[in-house]
Every structure is written in structure tokens, then in C-alpha cells.
Image (cartoon, coloured by chain):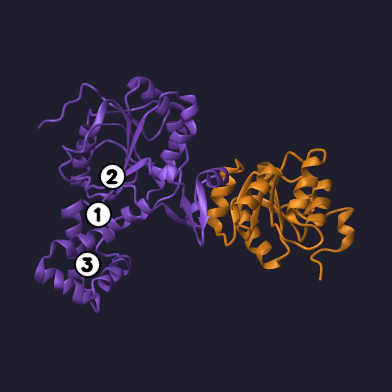
């Protein structure tokens, strides 16, 4: 089952774009937004909790194509990106994203089980800013996001 | 462990290494000493402590002290001190030394992340500092920590705490489950066991000393001794890095804070330590 209905491609909803979902007082802080892209619902949930704790507003996508739809509707400040996903992989998404108008802006942090040096180099060459090898924990996400200049 | 045993551990740590150990923290003490007991072939912590009381063996006593020493460490821990080192301190001391080697000491280096972080910076800055010669030293009170540091092997968790990904792929190679630092970086650091509150008069002179999160781990009276040792080991125009929220209040006059750079201190050249 898909995490979100197909029509959300045309008009994504959720905390990124819908002001009614924003909690009171949030506007004053201009929370940074992070799009969490992973085909595992469990990973998305864990990452969401960690990133919300360090002050991000979260949107989720379960593959590269869905992530692209999000970005075209509202470019996030950061993308936490899995590599191997159905429909469109993380690296394919990244190549397309970096060629889109405004697509150079988001800080992209890979988060994947791929830990081969060649794969890491490929990700950086395609425009990734940082790289997390799974398994990860809250500490690693926090220091990697700081490393990438996000916090 | 009985309160008396824990008290003895605390006394031992304070006397030998100046380490502050809270005897009320039974969980911490028991979990740290559990591995010492197993390694030394004792059936229980009680047996370990009984042996310590009876034999008063130096090796056993040090095993206990080393196990209680803090081992927390990360690559580029706190980031800012390393940026300062790269951008200001290293170029300054390199210019000061001319063609002579710049001597850098990572004191209480635990598993070596700090020393290797400095080595990577030196390596990456070489092109900007032609003729730069550096001698890099790492020391710790724990033999096991030093062995690990010297091996240059780190877990995937460890290389993701503070090490930017570009430095990981530039300076490390994957080796099974572990990551190994390149021989080039590994060979830049010399390792030595040093008790920072012992007599350090033969330690030599250093242009830069990183001694972070040591003062705050010591019992009050030993803090002065540590600062005296550092003042003696620091070259007249040298720089000292301390941890966040640590200061040199224990020893007046030896160091001056460098304005706007928290944690960085310069040696006061006029200061002399009574012999």
C-alpha cells in the first residue's frame, strides 16, 4: 500500500504547505523543513522523530518520484535520502533534483545501507552534501546535519 | 560492591591519576570494573577488590584506574576548536617556527580521534603551508585506549560521529565491518602512555596542546598540578586548547585567554613555575 494517495503529486498536503496544520507560534521560528525519503515506514517514523527533536518540520515520501513531486511543489531545506527504493532510487532522484530550478538549494543527506567507498563517492559527485551509513542513531543524524550546516 | 569497595576505587583513582570518581555511582563503577575482573580472571567484583586489598599489585591497581578514566571521544569534537586550529593556530605557529617542526600534543587522546583529526587537518593544509613540518603526539593514561588509537581501526558508528563524509573517503578505507585510517595519517602520530598529573618534566616542549575535558574530570587539588604541567610543557609562544566550560582558574598567570576564541589559551611568556 502506498503511503500517500497518488493525487498528492499534484498538490502535496501536510505540514509543509498547509498553514492550518502548523502549531501555534511556529511561524515565528520559521522551522526548517526536511523531506524524509525512504521506502520503509519504520525508518521514516524513526527519522521523523529524531529530526523533529532537533527542530525540523517533516514531510515524508516513500520513493524518489514522490520526493520529486514534493520538491516541485515546495522545495524543502533538507532531504534525508535513502538509496534503494522502488519506482525511483535516491541517486536518480538526486540527479533530477539538482537539474531542476531551485533544486541546488536543498541540503541532501544520504541515509542508506550502502557503505562502499565508490558508492559514497558517486553520491557526492551527484550533489549529495553529507552521507549517513545505516544503522544510524539520533546522535549521528544530529552531527551530520550540523556538519552539513543545517543546525 | 560495598560502599567501602567503591570508596577505595575512588581513592585509588584520585591518588594515582587525580581522577574524580563519585563513589555513589555504583552502576558506573561496577560496569567499568566488570571487564577488569573478567580480564584478570576473577569470578566477581568482590574477588577483584579482595585481591587488590591483599596484594596491592601495581598492575591491578592501574587496570582499575584506567578502566575508570573517561573514554568519551569523537572526531572533530565540538568542531570550533578544530576550525580555529586549521585557520589560525596552525598557520601562526608554523610561521613562528620557520622551518623547524611544529610540535603538537593531543593529551588524554582516548581512542585517538582527536590526534587523527589534527593529523588530517595538517595533511590537508600542507599545500597552503609550504615547508610545514609537524610532530604529532597522542597520549593517554589507558593502555587499551592507546592500543586502539595506534591500530587506527574504528567502527562505523565511530567514524560517523563528527567526521565529515569527504574526510572519511579521503583518509579511510573500509575493512570488513571496520574503517581503517590510511597509513599516511596513522604514521603521523606517535603514541605514549602519560599520566598528566605525574612528573612531566621530561615530556618535552610543545607549540600546541589539546587537553580537553581533562581538568573537569579531575579532583580539585590535582587541577593545579595538571595546569602546572601544561604550563611547563607549553612553549613560550604556544597555545592550549581546553574543553567547553573548562578554564585555567586553578593556576593564575600562566595562561591568557585568546579574545573571542572560547577554550583557546596562550602561554604567558613571563610566567615562571617555581621548581
Q: Secondary structure at mark 2?
A: helix
The answer to whether B70 is drawn above or below residue A4 in the figure is above
Of mark 3 and mark 1, the one earlier in the sequence is: 3
Q: Residues within 10 Å of mark 2 (few under 14, many from 20)?
A: many
Q: Secondary structure at mark 3?
A: helix
Q: Residue at 45%, 55% (x, y): give it.
A: B154
- Disc number placed over residue B6 in the picture, else none: 3
Q: Residue at 34%, 46% (x, y): give it.
A: B213
Residue B272 seen in this snapshot: yes
Task: Report whether A95 appears left or right of B228.
Answer: right
Of mark 1 and mark 2, the one earlier in the sequence is: 1
Q: Nearer the viewer, residue B149 or B69?
A: B149
- Disc number placed over residue B20 in the picture, else none: 1
Task: Report whether A84 appears left or right of B166.
Answer: right
- According to the picture, the residue beneath numbered tag 2 turns out to be B215
Residue B30 seen in this snapshot: no
Do badges 2 and 3 share one subunit?
yes
Q: Nearer the viewer, residue B207 or B150?
A: B150
Q: Residue at 10%, 69% (x, y): give it.
A: B55
How many numbered discs sit on the rendered protein? Answer: 3
The answer to whether A122 is drawn above or below residue B64 in the figure is above
Of mark 2 and mark 3, the one earlier in the sequence is: 3
Chain B: colour as depicted = purple
Amino acid at each position: 500500500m502506498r503511503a500517500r494517495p497518488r493525487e498528492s503529486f499534484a498538490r502535496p498536503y501536510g505540514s509543509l504547505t498547509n498553514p492550518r496544520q502548523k502549531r501555534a507560534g511556529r511561524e515565528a521560528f520559521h522551522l526548517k523543513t526536511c523531506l524524509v525519503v525512504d521506502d520503509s515506514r519504520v525508518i521514516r517514523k524513526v527519522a521523523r522523530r529524531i529530526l523533529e527533536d532537533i527542530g525540523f518540520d517533516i514531510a515524508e515520501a516513500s520513493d524518489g518520484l514522490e520526493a520529486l513531486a514534493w520538491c516541485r511543489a515546495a522545495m524543502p531545506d533538507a532531504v534525508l535520502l535513502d538509496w534503494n527504493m522502488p519506482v525511483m532510487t535516491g541517486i536518480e532522484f538526486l540527479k533530477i533534483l539538482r537539474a531542476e530550478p531551485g533544486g541546488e538549494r536543498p541540503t541532501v543527506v544520504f541515509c542508506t545501507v550502502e557503505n562502499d567507498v565508490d558508492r559514497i563517492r558517486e553520491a557526492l559527485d551527484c550533489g549529495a552534501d553529507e552521507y549517513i551509513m545505516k544503522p544510524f542513531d539520533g546522535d549521528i543524524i544530529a552531527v551530520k546535519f550540523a556538519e552539513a550546516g543545517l543546525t | 560492591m560495598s560502599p567501602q569497595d567503591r570508596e577505595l576505587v575512588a581513592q585509588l583513582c584520585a591518588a594515582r591519576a587525580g581522577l574524580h570518581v563519585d563513589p555513589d555511582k555504583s552502576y558506573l563503577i561496577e560496569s567499568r570494573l566488570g571487564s577488569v575482573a573478567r580480564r584478570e580472571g576473577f569470578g566477581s567484583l568482590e574477588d577483584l577488590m579482595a585481591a587488590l586489598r591483599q596484594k596491592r599489585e601495581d598492575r591491578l591497581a592501574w587496570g582499575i584506574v584506567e578502566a575508570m578514566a573517561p573514554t568519551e571521544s569523537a572526531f572533530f569534537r565540538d568542531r570550533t576548536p578544530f576550525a580555529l586550529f586549521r585557520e589560525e593556530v596552525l598557520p601562526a605557529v608554523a610561521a613562528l617556527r620557520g622551518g623547524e617542526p611544529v610540535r603538537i600534543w593531543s593529551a588524554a587522546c582516548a581512542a585517538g580521534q582527536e590526534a587523527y583529526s589534527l593529523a588530517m587537518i595538517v595533511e590537508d593544509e600542507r599545500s597552503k603551508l609550504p615547508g610545514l613540518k609537524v610532530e604529532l603526539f597522542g597520549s593517554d593514561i589507558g593502555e587499551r585506549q592507546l592500543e586502539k588509537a595506534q591500530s587506527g581501526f574504528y567502527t562505523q558508528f565511530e567514524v560517523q560521529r563528527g567526521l565529515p563524509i569527504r574526510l572519511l573517503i579521503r583518509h579511510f578505507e573500509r575493512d570488513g565491518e571496520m574503517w581503517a585510517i590510511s597509513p599516511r595519517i596513522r604514521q603521523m602520530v606517535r603514541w605514549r602512555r602519560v599520566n598528566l598529573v605525574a612528573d612531566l618534566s621530561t615530556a618535552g616542549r610543545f607549540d600546541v596542546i589539546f587537553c580537553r575535558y581533562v581538568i573537569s574530570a579531575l579532583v580539585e587539588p590535582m587541577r593545579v598540578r595538571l595546569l602546572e604541567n601544561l604550563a611547563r610543557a607549553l612553549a613560550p609562544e604556544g597555545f592550549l586548547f581546553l574543553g567547553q566550560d573548562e578554564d585555567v582558574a586553578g593556576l593564575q598567570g600562566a595562561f591568557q585567554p585568546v579574545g573571542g576564541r572560547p577554550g583557546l589559551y596562550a602561554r604567558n611568556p613571563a610566567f615562571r613555575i617555581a621548581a
